[in-house]
Amino acid sequence: MADSFEEIENRLDHITKEMDYLNHHQVVIGFFSDENSLLLTVVRANEYGAHIRPKNASGFLWIPSRQAIKEFGKNVTAKDVRNKYQLFIPKGKHIAAVNQDGKLVTYFYLMQKVDIPARAFIRKTGIDYRQKYRRYIKAGIEEIMYDGKTGKALLEKLGRMGVSDMREVMRRWTKPGNAPLTIDNKRGANNPLVDTGQLQKRITWKILPMTGGTL
């Protein structure tokens, strides 16, 4: 039986309303925090690369060794080690070490600079899955037209999908890998984007108006 005029009119009203919603809203996938937060600093350093130079009087960056991290935690400082040991810099060596029973144990590597290569996992997600998202958007619009689905439901679906895809890109990342020193500190691990998994857990999505701001 053919749809009544009222049913057709209601369907057209629904389609118009939901397409208007899609025209004025977007789903954004990534990391959300204060502009100068540590989280966004780490994300920017990975996505675009970074050049880190020392700002202390020694003229070196003090990079903790595996032993220092094991004993004092990943946020260990030279002060932490000095509170327990006599830390010194052997002549001609770029390390800070402790003499333990006649054996030199390295607690920090002294580096003049650290260059972090770009690992554009956010942009790579968009490139790798672009065609997939286009297919889902097309299917979502058809569901709005014929099945009474909503624009918000479509953006929510894309948001969840984008988070999953970005996490997968991070898990697969291999090149450029970690520096030899970083690999050593991570006991051979060479995925620069997956350490404790905390960065992956912070990926999320939001529906935002096209003009910016949050809903």
Image: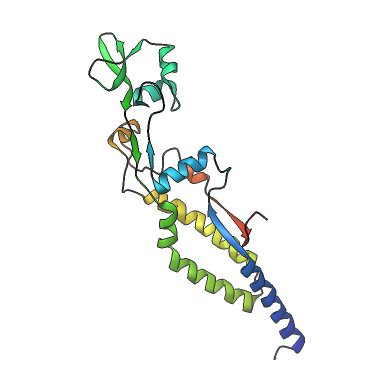
User: Is residue 64 visible to the viewer in this orientation of the structure?
Assistant: no
Q: Residue at x 64, y 73 (%)?
A: 19
In depth, the one of 1 and 39 nearer the eye is 39
Residue extending furthest toward the top:
101
Give the camera-side residue of 37 and 188.
37
Horizontal side, residue 40 vs residue 24: left or right: left
Query: On the image, which quarter does residue 69 sit in?
Result: top left
On screen, residue 183 above or below 27: above
Percent of width and height locating residue 96? 32, 19
Q: Is residue 175 above or below residue 161?
A: above
Q: Is 88 above or below relative to 190?
A: above
At 38% from the left edge and 11% from the top edge, which residue is drawn?
85
Q: Residue furthest bottom?
A: 1
Q: Quadrant of the C terminus?
A: bottom right
Judged from this view, the residue extending furthest toward the left is: 92
Q: Residue at x 63, y 78 (%)?
A: 145
The colour scheme of the drawn protein is rainbow
> Residue 46, image x and y in percent?
41, 45
Residue 61, compared with residue 88, is above or below; it is below
Residue 25 in sight here: yes
| Quarter the N terminus occupies | bottom right
In the rendered image, which quarter is residue 101 located in?
Answer: top left
Horizontal arrangement in the rendering, residue 187 relative to residue 4 (left or right): left
Q: How far across and how far down the image is residue 8, in percent?
A: 71, 85
Q: Residue 49, how many percent across, how many down?
A: 38, 45
